[in-house]
Image (cartoon, grey):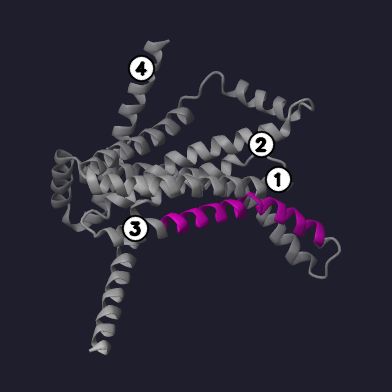
Amino acid sequence: MAGANLLALIDDIATLLDDVAMMSKMAAKKTAGVLGDDLALNANQVQGVKPDREIPVVLAVAKGSFINKLILVPAALVISAFVPVLITILLVLGGLYLCFEGAEKLLHRFIPHADSSADAAARLDTLSDPSVDIVQLEKDKIKGAIRTDFILSAEIVVITLGSLQGADLTTQILVLSGLSIAFTVGVYGLVAGIVKMDDLGLYLLRKSLTGSYNSAQRLIGRFLLSAAPILMKVLSVVGTIAMFLVGGGILTHSIGFLHHMAASVIAWLPGVSLLASIAFDGIAGLIAGVIVALAVTAIAKLRK
């Protein structure tokens, strides 16, 4: 009897872990856009910090990110348990915010502001001014990065929870907690690696002057030095595209008429249904983002 109960318990645990793994994989796919943007944004946040302070700053922001998720995960679970309809509303708002953020990046890139060069010059003057308190500047940078992380973490938690609707509470807790830890460690581990790429390249170049493998070290060092800024640009572009795809996908699956429209487009193009679905999500995200960005700009001008 005891043996049968033990086997039943093991079977239940195996089933639960299988459900957790499957739902974690599904949720990770849906949060890919936010994670790409989170990675690029946090890597950019560390730019301008002294090289010997880059890793401590990344660790400080990662600690703040863990605290953010420690607040957000229980709050999201409570909302899901008592007001589940609010999850869909928050999901749509999160999707709109993703689309808005992507559209804002595009508008800033293709419609540059007149004061952008002045802002860049002001930042350079601040960093080169010996009277500026670098410690306080670093603390402000960390606080700003943690605030931004709170918004992105909220999006990740809501999107993840939205993909877990219908699952039992234990599965939701395990998936949310596991992904929150994995995403934080993964994102900030990659950020630390990216911001130190140029330092590693410079180290290898210097070492190649005295090392026994001069040519190999020199080649790797030059590659890392040239790849670091390119990687930052690629991350920014990929993150922006993913924001439209993920944000548009959320809107398409959550808003009735968009869902029916997407189904009609996919049915009309059966041979390339997957590409048609991705393209529709991206276009819907782009249109929604531009509309929200223009509305926000108009409201800001009216307030002024």
Q: Report the magenta residues as a range.
A: 179-207
Distance from Cα at disc 4 to Cα at disc 1: 40 Å
Residue 114 drawn at (x, y percent):
54, 18
Closest to the camera, between mark 3 and mark 1, is 3
- Mark 3–mark 4 Cα distance, whole angstroms, equals 41 Å
User: Is residue 238 in view from this perspective?
Assistant: no
Residue 182 shown in magenta: yes
Please tell me whether residue 176 is drawn above or below residue 106 in the rendered image: below
Residue hosting label 4: 298
Q: What is the three-letter code of the residue carrying label 3? A: Ile
**x, y (%) of residue 136?**
68, 32
Categorize mark 1 by other alpha carbons within 10 Å: few (<14), some (14-19), many (20+): few
| Dominant secondary-structure state across the stretch colored magenta | helix
Q: Secondary structure at mark 1?
A: helix
- Looking at the picture, how far across and down is residue 46, in whole percent? 62, 42
Front of the two marks 2 and 3: 3
Near mark 3 (Cα within 10 A), the count class, few <14, some 14-19 or many ≥20, is some
Residue at the disc numbered 3:
173
Residue that numbered label 2 is attached to: 138
Pick out the residue farthest to the front: 2
Kindly report the distance in space between the C-alpha atoms of the residues bearing marks 2 and 1: 9 Å
The span from disc 3 to disc 1 (Cα, nearest Å) is: 35 Å
Give the residue type that dot 4 points to: Ala
**The residue tagged with tag 3: helix, strand or loop?**
helix
Amino acid identity at mark 2: Glu
> Residue under circle 1?
53
Q: Nearer the viewer, mark 4 or mark 2?
A: 2
Q: Is residue 301 above or below residue 185?
A: above
